[in-house]
């Protein structure tokens, strides 16, 4: 199991967990979820539910990844399988992303 903290404009918004290659969970942090001033992380993950489950990496997060030759180069340099979306997300979305969301790897095991 791998996990990452999801930040929006530097504020901890939630946790993204890869339970297996076919099981993903995104969960809003309690304080972020109840704060009506904080917007949803994405339109596809509205704050109408605190926890979301998917059989594949949520499209919002997979769309943060490079494609084509940039993806191949990142995979080669980082020594990550080109098909490992979650691994690439953990290593490439920590700073300087296109939008307001950044991803920080959680090194220890995360329990729901």
Image (tube, grey):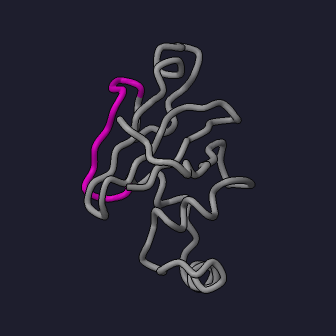
- In the image, residue 18 lies at what x, y percent? 37, 54
**Residue 47: x percent and y percent?**
41, 25
In what quadrant of the picture does the C terminus appear?
A: top left
Range covered by the magenta-colored residues: 47-57
Q: Which residue is pictured at 46% across the width and 60% down the height?
A: 62
Quadrant holding the N terminus: bottom left
Q: What residue lies at 42% left-to-right and 77% top-to-bottom?
A: 83
- In the picture as drawn, the residue positioned furthest to the right comes out as 96
Q: From the viewer's perspective, tell me whether residue 94 is left or right of residue 81.
A: right
Q: Residue at x 35, y 23 (%)?
A: 48
Vertical order, 28 against 74 (above or below): above
Disc count in the image? 0
Answer whether residue 50 is magenta in the image.
yes
Residue pictured at 61% horizontal, 49% vertical:
104
Where 24 falls versus 65 (above or below)?
above
Give the main secondary structure, helix, strand or loop, of the magenta stretch: loop
Q: Position of residue 8 (x, y in %)?
A: 62, 36
């Amino acid at each position: 199991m791998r996990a990452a903290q999801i930040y929006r404009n530097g504020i901890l918004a939630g946790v993204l967990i890869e339970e297996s290659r076919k099981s993903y969970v995104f969960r809003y942090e309690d304080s972020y979820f109840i704060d009506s001033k904080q917007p949803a992380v994405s339109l596809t993950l509205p704050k109408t539910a605190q926890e979301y489950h998917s059989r594949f990496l949520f499209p919002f997060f997979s769309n943060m990844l490079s494609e084509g030759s940039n993806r191949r180069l990142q995979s080669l340099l980082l020594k990550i399988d080109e098909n490992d979306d979650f691994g690439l997300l953990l290593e490439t979305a920590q700073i300087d992303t296109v939008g307001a969301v950044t991803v920080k790897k959680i090194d220890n095991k995360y329990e729901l």
